[in-house]
Amino acid sequence: AASAITQSSFNLAWSAVSGASSYKVSEASAKFAEVSVSSNSKSITGLNPSTAFSVRVKACNSAGVCSANSPNVAVSTSAAPIPVPAVP
């Protein structure tokens, strides 16, 4: 599940898989590079505001053999704030 969603980041957490030594997190349309993590959570940063993502995770064992991707999780970053106009 996604949490702590901002205009440039979100946190993703999932259930741990028995026998997994790492997890690979990716986006279905490659809007960010696949990342490998050793825990069952990841903070995804450096994103654009108001952007929709389809995020998925796969579990890998110590031999590097990975499962199929999890179902996609839809996450959208927040909109950038509207600047306050300067009054002369």
Image (tube, rainbow, N blue to C red):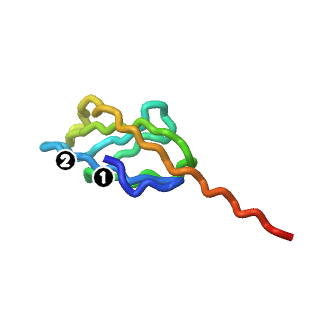
The amino acid beneath tag 1 is: Ser
Viewport quadrant of the C terminus: bottom right
Q: In this view, does 87 lie above or below 50?
A: below
- Image position, residue 83 (x, y; %): 69, 60
**Residue in front for this viewpoint, 37 or 78:** 78
* 67 in relation to 62, above or below: above
The reply to whether dot 1 and dot 2 touch (C-beta < 8 Å) is: no
Residue that sits furthest to the top in the current view: 68
Q: What element carries label 2?
A: loop
Q: What residue type is labelled 2?
A: Ala
Mark 1 surroundings within 10 Å by alpha-carbon count, few (fewer than 14), some (14 through 19), many (20 or more): some
Residue 32 placement, left or right of 12 = right
Q: Which structural element holds mark 1? A: strand
The x and y percentages for residue 52 are 49, 39
In which quarter of the view is residue 59 placed?
A: top left
Q: How many marks?
A: 2
Q: How far apart are marks 1 and 2 (CA)?
A: 9 Å
**Res. 53 mark:** none
Q: Nearer the viewer, residue 65 or 72?
A: 72
Q: Is residue 52 above or below residue 45?
A: above
Q: Residue furthest bottom?
A: 88
Q: Which of 70 and 61 is in front in this view?
A: 70
Query: Residue 29's spot in the image, x, y percent?
Result: 48, 31
Residue 16 shows which numbered tag? 2
* Furthest residue toward left: 18
| Mark closest to the chain's N terminus, 1 or 2 | 2
The residue depicted at 21 percent of the width and 38 percent of the height is 63
Residue visible at 36% across and 42% down? 25
Residue at mark 1: 41
Q: Position of residue 32 (x, y in %)?
A: 49, 41
